[in-house]
Amino acid sequence: MKLALTLGAALLASSAAVAMEGIDLDIDGDGFATKAEITQLLGVVSRSDFNQLDGNNDGRLSGKELASPGVREVIGRYESSMSIVHGVSDVDLNGDRFLTRDELKAQYDGFNEQDFRDLDLNNDQRIDAREFYNPASQAIVTRYEMAPTMDLTIQQVDMDGDYFVSYEELKDAFPSVSQADFNQIDLNNDNRVHSVEFYNSQAQIIFDRTKG
Ligand SMILES: [Ca+2]
Ligand SMILES: [Ca+2]
Ligand SMILES: [Ca+2]
Ligand SMILES: [Ca+2]
């Protein structure tokens, strides 16, 4: 328990706090968050945490259940293991559950056209929740949020395209990086580096020291 708290705090200290609201858990916007939707965003949630939120025990969370303060608390328990950390609510100013160019630019300074096209998979000129929760999209906005001036992107180091960086991938990019360096970058000790860890200032210092 103490370990989990420490790791959560480490992720928060990295300045990209998880920005996920209850309503963000309803990915397809049908008014309910199913276990599959919750798992996609938070990872595997314990039965007791789920039951705590599912007041009427129908196996899914309604809009009313998602609006309860307990949801934020449960999300908080999974912050150190979440790979999707930016919720639609974080960017969606008018509450229509779609993200426009203007909304993205308002949240992320200098958000550019190429990145918008990369997010907009179906080319309908707006970003829906499925598009935004794509690991590629999450990596793009994490960079804007945490390290907008950094030239190196996680995509350049992540050779197998899973949007996590392994020690081997990191070593290819930074030959003198050590296992101890990797462990320091991997804040939650899951043996892979997520974009939030990659763009963290601590990691940047290690990259600068070990490059070329
Ligand atoms: Ca749903
Ligand atoms: Ca919107
Ligand atoms: Ca779209
Ligand atoms: Ca990690």
Image (cartoon, rainbow, N blue to C red):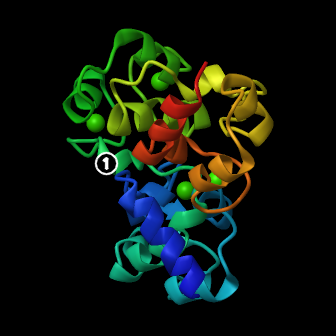
Q: Is residue 205 visible?
A: yes
In the image, is 123 to the left or to the right of 20? Answer: right
Which amino acid does the dot numbered 1 rest on?
Asp
At 58% from the left and 36% from the top, the residue drawn is 134
Residue 43: give x, y in percent of width and height.
66, 62
Which quadrant holds the N terminus? bottom right
Image: 77 above or below 113: below
Looking at the rendered structure, the secondary structure element under dot 1 is helix
In the image, is 189 to the left or to the right of 185? Answer: right
Residue 33: give x, y in percent of width and height.
54, 63
- Residue 57 falls in which quadrant of the image? bottom right
Which quadrant holds the C terminus? top right
At 46% from the left and 37% from the top, the residue drawn is 204
**Residue furthest to the top:** 114
Residue located beneath label 1 in the image:
90
At 29% from the left and 29% from the top, the residue drawn is 104
- Residue 58 falls in which quadrant of the image? bottom right
Q: Nearer the viewer, residue 147 or 202?
A: 202
Q: Nearer the viewer, residue 142 or 156?
A: 156
At 59% from the left and 72% from the top, the residue drawn is 60
Image: 142 above or below 156: below
